[in-house]
Image (cartoon, rainbow, N blue to C red):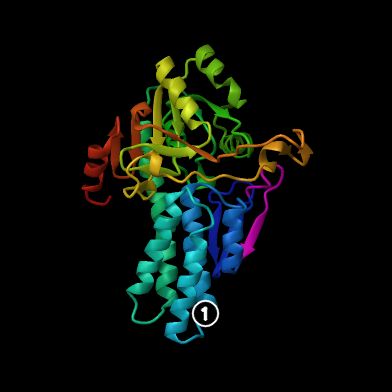
Amino acid sequence: MDKSLPNRAIEWRDRQLILLDQRRLPNAVEFLSIDTVSGTFDAIRDMVVRGAPAIGITAAYGVVLSALKHQQLDDGNARQQINTDIARLSTARPTAVNLAWALQRMQKCLQNQNSVCLNSLEKEAIAIHQEDIAANKVMGELGASFMDAQSTVMTHCNAGALATGGYGTALGVIRSAFAHGKLEKVFANETRPWFQGSRLTAWELEQEQIPVNLICDSAAASALRAHHVDWIIVGADRVAANGDVANKIGTYSLAVLAKHMGKKFMVVAPTSTIDLNSASGDDIEIEQRDRQEVTNVGGNIMATEGAKVWNPVFDVTPAALIDVLITERGAVENPNTSKIVQLFSKQDV
């Protein structure tokens, strides 16, 4: 892997999981080698790897590491241990549905075997990874087709190669638009409290010389007013059956701004991110994280000790605020329940 410009945040090499430590960017490009389920769980929980598709892919490889560890056991005990590890991995982070989706796919692969087969599980995890990259490229082209020449885009958080198997969802659209000469520039919101926009998105775009302007989250409305922004383009961590979207905290605010100011709002996510078991955004569990993520920045205390903190990682954007949902199976304009059902009736791409 070219460490100056990693195309992927996740690599599977010699039956080890290699993760780009995204907590260290942009100051350092460091990779962690993980060979245990516990290490995989910690990497997801502690945000070494983040982004819904990337979390699912990482967990799938974690199941392979479990099978590798327990391959010397008899079949019954091996299955029990692997299923225990799958259950543990499923609790690493609650909101991104790709985690459960990938683990369910790995568990189905295990159940379909007469005896535990490490090679089959490894093949399935690699397929999940490769299919995500292929889906991202399809979505990139489809999303870019909605854009006119010389478009200006605003994005929030990081939904690029770092958050997926490679290429990206929202940034995949931006990459494709840039490749087709349709993109003038990008406004990237800093994305408090983890600064994914400033640390990851701006860094990722700069690596490919895609024009990017970094702004404070609180400057979004002013930027939309002062500049001719055509599209706000974001990824998603879970899409409910009615088209409501859970994404990084602050996304809902941008959607409201877009509606008020006449800007187009695009969500880009593979169908693995759509949760048909969640009827609406009200059914999506929103992860809450530690207060220190808000009160401390770079080791510096930014708030009084007695201040209480409410730190939801995600918010829910109602489907009514979304102009188009881009998936690898097609585009859903003004998404709703019936259109989502129709999307899933299509043949796999």
| 265 sits left or right of 296 in the view | left
**Which quadrant, please, contains the N terminus?**
bottom right
Residue 54: x, y in percent? 50, 52
Most foreground residue, 164 or 336: 336
| Dot 1 amino acid type | His
Callout 1 secondary element: loop
Residue at the image position 42 percent from the left and 31 percent from the top: 177
Residue 289: x, y in percent? 60, 45
Residue 331 picture quarter: top left
Residue 124 visible:
yes
Residue holding disc 1:
70
Most foreground residue, 335 or 149: 335
- Verify whether residue 218 appears in magenta: no
Most foreground residue, 4 or 327: 327
Q: Provide the residue span drawn in magenta.
A: 22-34
Above or below 347: residue 119: below
- Verify whether residue 31 appears in magenta: yes
Residue at the image position 47 percent from the left and 80 percent from the top: 78
Residue 26 visible:
no
Residue at the image position 59 percent from the left and 26 percent from the top: 217
Above or below 78: residue 271: above
Residue 343 picture quarter: top left
Residue 271: x, y in percent? 34, 47
Above or below 306: residue 11: below
